[in-house]
Amino acid sequence: QVQMVESGGGLVQAGGSLRLSCAASGLTFSRSDMAWFRQAPGSEREFVATITAPGGSRNYANSVKGRFTISRDNAKNTVFLQMNSVKPEDTAVYYCAAWPAYESKYAYWGQGTQVTVSS
């Protein structure tokens, strides 16, 4: 059974930093592309960042490029999102997602962690 558990969310002031973690189990993590998405109230879920397996190629949404960094630790089956210079518009529920090599989509999702940025 695949489990994805996010942590690290919370309340942060604008301009501050936050680091999200997502621990995965039940899948071949090192062969899974990993990503972060977010969903703000009243909005659709949107892509934030992705990191491929195992080479670690990264891609970011324009809205977070230069401020957020995605990384992974294959030994710990964990993906991270370092959020710097956060803005109130970054307020959302953040979800991690896994795209295993044998799938054709992001097949597994975490339950989400709330990030709130105060101005």
Image (spheres, grey):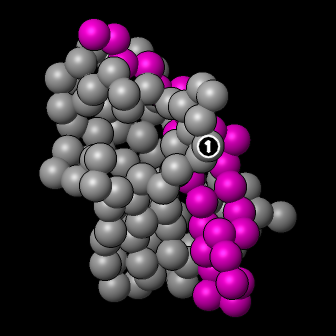
Q: Position of residue 88 (x, y in %)?
A: 33, 21
Q: Which amino acid type corresponds to the residue marked 1 in the rendered image?
A: Glu
Task: Give the residues in magenta.
Answer: 93-119
Which residue corresponds to the image point at 34% horizontal and 57% vertical from the top-left? 61
Which of the 4 image quadrants contains residue 87? top left
Which residue corresponds to the image point at 46% horizontal and 45% vertical from the top-left? 21
Q: Position of residue 70 (x, y in %)?
A: 33, 57
Figure check: 58 above or below 16 = below
Q: Position of residue 52 (x, y in %)?
A: 42, 78
Name the residue beneath numbered marker 1.
44
The answer to whether residue 58 shows anywhere in this view is yes
Secondary structure under the numbered disc 1 in the rendered image: loop
Which residue corresponds to the image point at 36% horizontal and 48% vertical from the top-left? 81
| Mark 1 crowdedness (10 Å alpha carbons): few <14, some 14-19, many ≥20 | few
Which residue corresponds to the image point at 54% horizontal and 31% vertical from the top-left? 40
Question: Which residue is situated farthest in the bottom direction here?
Answer: 102
Which of the 4 image quadrants contains residue 59? bottom left
Q: Is residue 7 magenta?
A: no
Q: Is residue 108 magenta?
A: yes
The front one of 115 and 73 is 115
Tell me how many marks there are: 1
User: Is 78 left or right of 60, judged from the image as shown?
Assistant: right
